Image (spheres, rainbow, N blue to C red):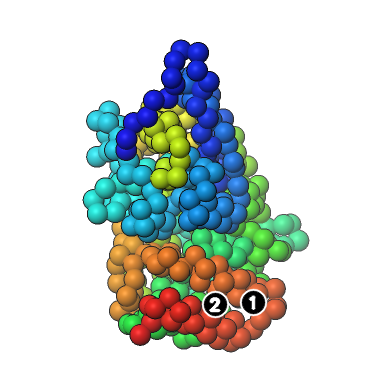
Amino acid sequence: MASVSLAAGANAEPVSITIATVNNGDMVTMQKLSDAFEKANPDIKLNWVVLEENTLRQRVTTDIATHAGQFDVLTIGNYEAPIWAQRGWLEKITPDAAYDTDDLLKPVRDSLSYKGAIYALPFYAESAMTYYRTDLFKKAGLTMPTAPTYEQIRQFADKITDKSNGVYGMCLRGKPGWGENMAFFTMLVTAMGGQWFGDGYHATIDTPAWHKALDWYDGILKADGPPGATSNGFNENLALFASGHCGMWIDSTVAAGLLYDKKQSTVADKVGFAPVPTGSYTGGPTWLWSWALAVPVSSTHKGAAEKFVTWATSKAYVDLVAKTNGWVSAPAGTRQSTYANPQYKAVAPFASFVLDAIDNSNPNGKTAQPRPYVGAQFVGIPEFQGIGTQVGQTIAATLTGGLSADQALKSAQSATQRTVRQAGLAH
């Protein structure tokens, strides 16, 4: 990235950069700690736009596609990074040697790269895992297997649900969105032997595997889930679990640091963890996501923006979080040095488990039948933002009783096939 002069002279006004980010706990921490960056860089002023996940995705996609230049730093994921890099929308990022790019976990680094160059730096990264309440399992006489199946999880949820006391056996993402309910649901479909598309980009939604996945998802949330599940995304379920209302939750590994933090979780000493459940198909892609920071080509302050991006994803920032909030709160899933740190391992019993889950997330792995795309909990094509959100709304409608499973999957199949045909993908 070309460097730019950050100030014309000693008395020049600071360069002001605008950062668009998601309202997840780790990013809220980043905003709180950013005073340290401004003190070290008095020629740069930070402006924050903090948004709910679906809204963030809409805003940054619109901004970058229209070259509006509203934002200088974008919080995006490993879905957008290679696609937007290919389109020439993102600046290549080349940190100096002190940043230690080789310290970034390889699956994460590779997922944010295009043609060998990095276009976004990971703020945190995640795979998925199953969280459960050890006290509720003990009370019900249950033992979590080392490799649970979805069928077993359903049985456990039935036994630990206690709605009269506000305890729900299973919390899952129900909020519609390609990165909300469809992130979990895509992983569930893979485990049931399905995928989004077969050869020739023929949609494979109205199929037995999808029906099996929807029956499980719809059934467990209606029987054992909290009310209003279609309003619950990652943050809402995190709050439910941390306040003692979830018996189990299958979601991002990044939640572990929050659930084990006694300052943020009332059940910090009652959390157990296990792998993502398995279905009839094992060994396929599971989940790999990174919330990362990128600089759009439309930014007029690229040098200042890259300076912030490298600071917020650096080893020094990890140390700052640890010093301020404790090592259990350190950004997860990005750096080998974090997982090698004895202080982190001492307070994060999940550390090696999470590292292994990321290393084995296998986003480019095989599904039960051949597929023409890559991605674990998403489809790595530009059209998936629209497709995933539309199908997510259809899936959510089954939870509210607006559609039957048959109606939902038939509708999703038709709409998805039409979209890929119009895009010229299907043949």
Residue marked by disc 1: 398
Q: Which mark is residue 354?
A: none
The quadrant of the image that shows the C terminus is bottom left
Q: Determine crowd level at label 1: few under 14, some 14-19, many 20+ residues with C-alpha closer than 10 A.
A: many
Taking the spot 45% from the left edge, 69% from the top edge, the residue there is 383
Residue 99 in view (yes/no): yes
Instruction: Determine the CA span between mark 1 and mark 2.
Output: 9 Å
Residue 337 in view (yes/no): no
Percent of width and height locating residue 129: 45, 56
- Pick whichever, 315 or 145, lies toward us: 315
- Tell me which corner region of the image, top left, top right, bottom left or bottom right, holds residue 362: bottom left
Residue 219 in the image: above or below residue 84: below
Taking the spot 60% from the left edge, 75% from the top edge, the residue there is 394
> Are the residues tagged 1 and 2 within 8 Å (C-beta)?
yes
Residue 159 in the image: above or below residue 206: above
Q: Residue furthest top?
A: 10
- Tell me which corner region of the image, top left, top right, bottom left or bottom right, holds residue 99: top left
Sequence-first tag of 1 and 2? 2
Residue marked by disc 2: 214
Residue 294 in the image: above or below residue 207: above
Taking the spot 71% from the left edge, 63% from the top edge, the residue there is 227
Secondary element under disc 1, as helix, strand or loop, is helix
The answer to whether residue 16 is left or right of residue 304 is: right
